[in-house]
Image (cartoon, rainbow, N blue to C red):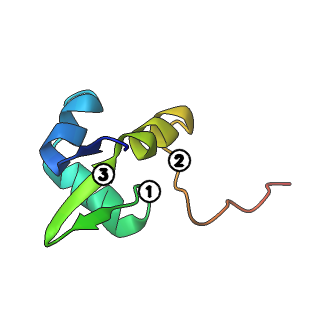
Amino acid sequence: METLLSVDEAARRLGGLSKYTIHAWLSSGKLRRTKVGSRTMIRESELQRVIEDGGKSAGRPRPEQQ
């Protein structure tokens, strides 16, 4: 079973970001949430994906520049 982190734990693991930044990233789709009952949790693999992507948004690809 994969480790699930609270918003506060995820913020600490991402270098001490604020929990408000994590909530903004969840709202914008940069991070994907996992709901456990009423709690918002973040999979450890999701944090790893954001780190590897350099913080780029997962959803919309950027248009190519000419």
Numbered mark located on residue 30 in the image:
1
The single residue placed furthest to the right in the displayed view is 66
> For this rendering, which residue is in front, 37 or 55?
37
The residue pinned by badge 3 equals 42
Which residue is drawn at the image coordinates 37% and 43% (left, top)?
2
- Find the distance from the CA under tag 1 to the CA under tag 2: 7 Å
Can residue 17 be seen here? The reply is no
Q: Amino acid at mark 3?
A: Ile
> For this rendering, which residue is in front, 13 or 36?
36
> For this rendering, which residue is in front, 31 or 66?
31
Q: Amino acid at mark 1?
A: Lys
- Find the distance from the CA under tag 1 to the CA under tag 3: 12 Å
Q: Are marks 1 and 3 in contact (CB under 8 Å)?
A: no
The single residue placed furthest to the top in the displayed view is 15
Secondary structure of the residue carrying tag 2 is loop
Q: Amino acid at mark 2?
A: Lys
Numbered mark located on residue 47 in the image:
none
Say which label, 3 or 2, has the lower sequence index: 3
Secondary structure of the residue carrying tag 3 is strand
Which residue is drawn at the image coordinates 43% and 46% (left, top)?
46
Question: Mark 3 or 2, which is nearer the eye?
Answer: 3
Q: How many marks?
A: 3
Numbered mark located on residue 56 in the image:
2
Q: Quadrant of the C terminus?
A: bottom right
- Find the distance from the CA under tag 3 to the CA under tag 2: 17 Å
Report whether 45 appears left or right of 60. Answer: left
Secondary structure of the residue carrying tag 1 is loop
Q: Are marks 1 and 2 in contact (CB under 8 Å)?
A: yes
Q: Quadrant of the N terminus?
A: top left
Which residue is drawn at the image coordinates 47% and 34% (left, top)?
51
Say which label, 1 or 2, has the lower sequence index: 1
